[in-house]
Image (cartoon, rainbow, N blue to C red):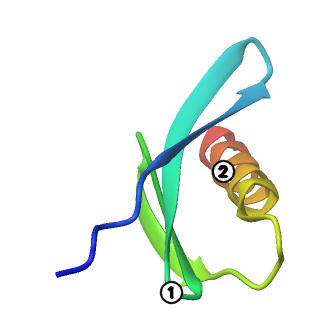
Amino acid sequence: MGASPMWESDQVAAGPSTYRGRYRLEGRRMVLEWRGGRITEGCGILQPEIEAESRLRQLVTRQAA
């Protein structure tokens, strides 16, 4: 059996707080987990760390609103 993908850490600052999450790639999909839940979506850019940071920032901003 193949090895499972490794999780990578990610964090974003929103106001005075820092939010942490983790992500991994599963084929062409990115799985992002953070304290607000877990999402899975397509990842079409070459640098998944940028995609993960951007998506985590969107989720944190949406939760704060």
> According to the image, label 2 marks what residue?
56
Q: Tell me which corner region of the image, top left, top right, bottom left or bottom right, holds residue 30.
A: bottom right
> According to the image, label 1 marks what residue?
27
Q: Secondary structure at mark 2?
A: helix
Q: Residues within 10 Å of mark 1 (few under 14, many from 20)?
A: few
Give x and y (percent) for residue 63: 60, 46
Q: Is residue 17 above or below residue 50?
A: above
Horizontal side of residue 40 vs 15, given as left or right: left
Residue located farthest toward the front when viewing the structure as drawn = 1
Residue located farthest toward the top when viewing the structure as drawn = 16
Q: Residues within 10 Å of mark 2 (few under 14, many from 20)?
A: many
Give x and y (percent) for residue 7: 44, 50
Q: Is residue 64 above or below residue 51?
A: above
Q: Tell me which residue sits at (51%, 86%) in the image.
A: 27
Q: Tell me which residue sits at (68%, 80%) in the image.
A: 43
Number of on-image labels: 2
| Residue type, mark 2 in image | Leu
Q: Quadrant of the C terminus?
A: top right
Q: Nearer the viewer, residue 58 or 41?
A: 41
Q: Nearer the viewer, residue 61 or 45?
A: 45
| Residue type, mark 1 in image | Gly
Q: Is residue 5 above or below residue 60?
A: below
Q: Tell me which residue sits at (43%, 47%) in the image.
A: 36
CA–CA distance in space, label 1 to label 2 = 20 Å
Q: Tell me which corner region of the image, top left, top right, bottom left or bottom right, holds residue 1.
A: bottom left
Residue located farthest toward the left when viewing the structure as drawn = 1
